[in-house]
Image (cartoon, rainbow, N blue to C red):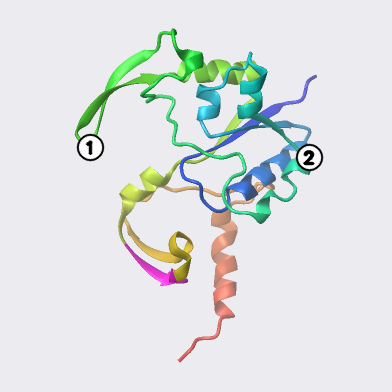
Amino acid sequence: MSAKRIGILTGGGDVPGLNSVIKSVVYRGTEIGYEVLGIRRGWEGLTHVDLKDPASRSRYIQPLNRENTRTIDRTGGTFLHSSRTNPSKMKNLPPVLQGHEFEAKESTKKDVTSTVYDVTPAVMKNIETLGLDYLIAIGGAAYLVSKAIHGARVVAFADLGMEAIYEFDVKDMPVTVAVDSKGTSVHQTGPAEWQQRIAGIPILQ
């Protein structure tokens, strides 16, 4: 029986922590005998890739293992790179998909209406051709989160810019459950851990 295969990509903004997630998936996946393929440049890697072209395949598909992910968690962002490609709302068809028929619809953004294409069938075909049993898509929740934030203030480390610690005033916040490679949810371990850490911080008068 051939090994199960996992595909992993990072979409949306390039934020801290993505490399750590990629490494966790690779280490846990290989531990249980799975192959892991990195899809480069987010969803673009599944909409733009020509799997019959070795150069295109090399540009967008990267086999991952413990050796080439061993040190990636030492830097922020994602070494697979990212994009804001949305397969269901493609304004322009990439060369590999030109000449094919896809569902077209009107999309309005900031009072500007344009025609977009849903290339989901092409993405599904590439997933099948790559032999992926699972696809892990990380990130891309910024839009949902931003809609729920009604106010914000910096609590600490303002000089870090976007990586400062913020306090948010939120409403109808979408819930994201972070789970590590051993299946432990941060929503189970986080509160107790941070209560313990905070308890040990001296209060300055």
For badge 2, the amino acid type reads Glu
Q: Which residue is mark 1?
A: 110
Q: Residue at x 78, y 33 (%)?
A: 33
Residue 172 visible? The answer is no
- 10 Å crowding of disc 1: few (<14), some (14-19), many (20+): few
In the rendering, at what x and y percent does residue 87 appear? 44, 25
Residue 153 visible? The answer is yes
Circle nearer the viewer, 1 or 2: 1
Bounds of the magenta span?
152-158
For badge 1, the amino acid type reads Lys
In the displayed structure image, the side of residue 132 where residue 96 appears, left or right: left
In the rendering, at what x and y percent does residue 169 appear? 32, 61
Q: Quadrant of the C terminus?
A: bottom left
Q: Residue at x 37, y 51 (%)?
A: 173
- Res 128 quadrant in image: top right
- 10 Å crowding of disc 2: few (<14), some (14-19), many (20+): few
Pointer 1 or 2: first along the chain: 2
> Chief secondary structure of the magenta span?
strand
Q: Which residue is mark 2?
A: 31
Q: Quadrant of the N terminus?
A: top right
